[in-house]
Image: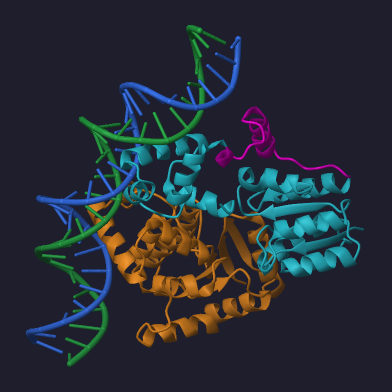
Chain colours: A orange, B cyan, C blue, D green
Amino acid sequence: MIRILIADDHSVVRKGIIQIIEEDFPFSIVQEVNTGEELVKHALTSSWDIIISDISLPGRSGIDALHQIKSAKPQLPVLILSMYPEEQYGIRVLKAGASGYLCKESASEVLVKAIHSILSGKKYITATIADAMVSKLMNDQNLMPHQLLSDREFEVMKLIAKGISLSEIGNLLSISITTVSTYRTRIFHKMHLHTNTALTLYALEHKL
Amino acid sequence: MIRILIADDHSVVRKGIIQIIEEDFPFSIVQEVNTGEELVKHALTSSWDIIISDISLPGRSGIDALHQIKSAKPQLPVLILSMYPEEQYGIRVLKAGASGYLCKESASEVLVKAIHSILSGKKYITATIADAMVSKLMNDQNLMPHQLLSDREFEVMKLIAKGISLSEIGNLLSISITTVSTYRTRIFHKMHLHTNTALTLYALEHKL
DNA sequence: GTTTCTTGTAGAATAATTACTACAAACAAC
DNA sequence: GTTGTTTGTAGTAATTATTCTACAAGAAAC
């Protein structure tokens, strides 16, 4: 009998995950939440065998929640299940302590396999993510420009791409606007871009 | 017994929809597809009582597929289920002939209600969408925002959308940069926008 | 185990932007 | 034909963005 906490803001997605799980773990205890705050609260106050969470949650983002959960309970395994392609977020969430990253496109069997693997204490790394990790080791040769960004830069990049002003970004992240500006410069340098518009289009094209 | 065709590229989402449906329609015939091409193919070659489709599908988009299906089989009801907020796409898909639009956040009961309503030949319109439709009627008749622009404003608008700076635009058009700025202000006012980024996205979406 | 590179942070100075205001010509309405 | 509205144009002042520089902590290289 396993205890599973599921975080996703789309109810059909939650139902889908539950359905897939219950075929394999008929007597599991499942709890659903739909915001980042609830996820953290339930993750820390009850005992779970595994957490399955989306990356984008209302309120606190899934990655934020992941950081918080991992710093309080480093042993608690978290599987991130999101609709973004694996190349995009895979490495990032693994670095943040997740036990695996799957795209919602994955077949149910993959999800089941991942859960089994994670419950037995291992990580679950798909071939796509393994590839990305290898290219990262190969001196960043085959990486997309945006994969060269640090976590903080990536965060700022997405906000700029959305058209949010530097001062607002400063407020959101509680850092000085000049700091935001420095990130911007570094982002543009790493990505070989010159205008916010180009960044917006890049982000759009790569579904960031 | 109803025959349902489900199109979504995320397998967990498909499972979720099926789960919700089967609670209410235990003997339904369900077929899943995950691309726009398959959706159109199955929609046109077999008989269905209802189609439930995501908006963003690989290959041909859900809206494209909807157009195609509706022009071949105007009577076949299609429910669009997507993760985008209702204000955004609701009116668009209804105009394209859909029988309803739901956000994936909606509770399962809403989905069930929508299906019942659609199977009985009616449309299913949420309050949010009804509101949006009313405000559309109150606003400027069916003009697109950019059609309200003067020629000069339109010219400037396209340059801004490309990411060209105001001073460069001033040079290109041989007018003062403050003049360009005035156009910008008027454009934003007429189009109800606030950021260059939003303008870029608008232009992209409308292929300007 | 020191040196180099990266990352997160920010100040000061300069450049670009935006808001507000203005005005004449064209055009529409009455 | 006067009155009101849109359009093309621009200046001044306030606000933002951008460049350049800097520095400490951590990671990586040697």
| Rendering coords of residue D8 (x, y %) | 42, 35
The answer to whether any part of residue B100 appears in the image is yes
B146 within the magenta span: yes
Q: Residue at x 46, y 64 (%)?
A: A202
Q: Quadrant of the N terminus of chain B?
A: bottom right
| Rendering coords of residue A168 (x, y %) | 34, 46
| Rendering coords of residue A171 (x, y %) | 31, 47
Q: Is residue A162 left or right of residue B42?
A: left
Q: Residue at x 65, y 48 (%)?
A: B89
Magenta region = B121-147
Q: Is residue A26 left or right of residue A84?
A: right
Q: Residue B75 or A102: which is nearer the viewer?
A: B75
B192 within the magenta span: no
The vertical placement of B67 against B14, above or below, is above
Q: Residue at x 82, y 68 (%)?
A: B41
Q: Residue A193 or B136: which is nearer the viewer?
A: A193
Q: Is residue A113 left or right of residue B183?
A: right
Q: Residue B84 or B177: which is nearer the viewer?
A: B177
The answer to whether any part of residue A176 appears in the image is no
Q: Residue A205 or A47: which is nearer the viewer?
A: A205
Q: Residue at x 89, y 45 (%)?
A: B120
- How many discs appear? 0
